[in-house]
Amino acid sequence: MKQSTILLLLLGTAAGSAVAQTNVTIYGIADVGVVAERGGSAGSVTKLTSGMASGSRLGFRGTEDLGGGLAANFLLETGIALDTGGFNQANTAFGRQAFVGLSGGFGGVTFGRQYTPQYATLLLADPFSTGLAGDAANLMPNTGDAASRMNNAIKYVSPNLEGFTGELAYGFGEVAGDNSSARQYGAAIGYANGPLAIRLGYHNRNNNTAVIKNTSSAKDTLLALTYDLKVAKLHLGYGVDKGTNSSPLRNTTNPYGSLVAPSASTDSRDLLLGVTVPFGVHTVLASYIRKDDKNSANQDANQWALGYRYAFSKRTDLYASYARINNDNGAGYTVGSAIEAGSGDKAFSVGIRHAF
């Protein structure tokens, strides 16, 4: 049976459950727009694309009260390509998230495909929330599966204790004969009080597999801080990346046609400075990111980005953004979006997003 048919059957079953059970919610985001990419060696491209600000998705979440303050919960979320009607995340049925778990006064424990604690730290640092042209995930540390997620993961999230929160996550490598191969683990600790929010995230991925042995682990540490002045919110991010795949290139096709293909850094430092300025139904976003490559190739890069959102309502907005990257010494970083790696060093996007 084709995957699309299986998914339709699952959606129909879940929709029927939603009618019968008030604790099941159907939700999603429909995001589509036009992006103009420039500067790649293959030439300019203008296209209709899905999920530039936030990946388009359809999800199902639910809880069941088990008594005594204990609850069971689940989440199934699939990525939707509105421009073609297909699926994102390598055409997987629920590639965005898929987990089940228990929660209570102790916090929550979940099992399945989930976001890494380090990626949630990046979301706090980036005023663009890793979306639009200006997405920080093309330069900032990101070692989780598919750039933000872990498969086969157990995750614990603590309760909020006077503003302090914490997360722990472990992803099984599932390589026969070698339990350490391909495993991942991460953690984060955060504090939020009034205008201040600060979070420290860490992720470690073992690159060793049954085929590739004795390869250094990817280790990423990221500090994120925001301070809300009401008239503007200030953003700061500082990351340290070490090891193979600690800072992978999102576009690996040698986008600028260099005689020597760009190589991903295995030792770098990242700095993000950003601001969010809301006024009425309008919001202006801006960020600067500096990638400092410590390898001998010294393939540094910096990105400037500017964005704008107009809110028709709490659920529907229009957006526009522009970003430009300056690559040094043959670096191959590209301007992407929430769902795409991008093909050049400049991009302009405009679109509409609706949440339901």
Image (spheres, rainbow, N blue to C red):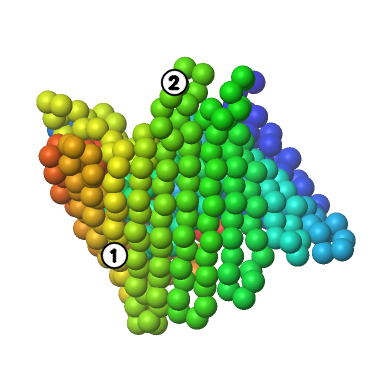
Residue at the outermost top position:
211
Q: Is residue 34 visible?
A: no
Disc ID at residue 273: 1
Name the spot of residue 75 as percent of width and height, x first.
Answer: 66, 48
- Provide residue 277's location: percent of width, then percent of height: 33, 74
Crowd around label 2: few <14 · some 14–19 · many ≥20 (10 Å): few
Residue 321, x across and y down, in percent: 27, 58
Tell me where residue 327 sits by quadrant.
top left
Residue extending farthest right: 67
Say which quadrant the N terminus sits in.
Answer: top right
Mark 2 against mark 1, which lies toward the viewer? 2
Image location of residue 103, percent across then percent down: 74, 57
SS state under label 1? strand
Q: Quadrant of the C terminus?
A: bottom right
Q: Between 227 and 299, which is closer to the camera in this rendering? A: 299
Q: Earlier in the sequence, mark 2 or mark 1?
A: 2
Residue type at mark 2? Ile
In the picture of the structure, the residue carrying the numbered disc 2 is 212
Residue 226 or 5: which is nearer the viewer? 226
| Residue placed most toward the observer, 204 or 41 | 204
Q: In percent of the image, x 65 and y 61: which residue is there?
A: 158
Amino acid type for the residue under numbered disc 1 = Leu
Q: Residue at x 47, y 55 (%)?
A: 201
**Based on the displayed image, in which of its 4 quarters is residue 215 positioned?**
top left
Query: Left or right: where does residue 129 sit relative to residue 349?
Result: right
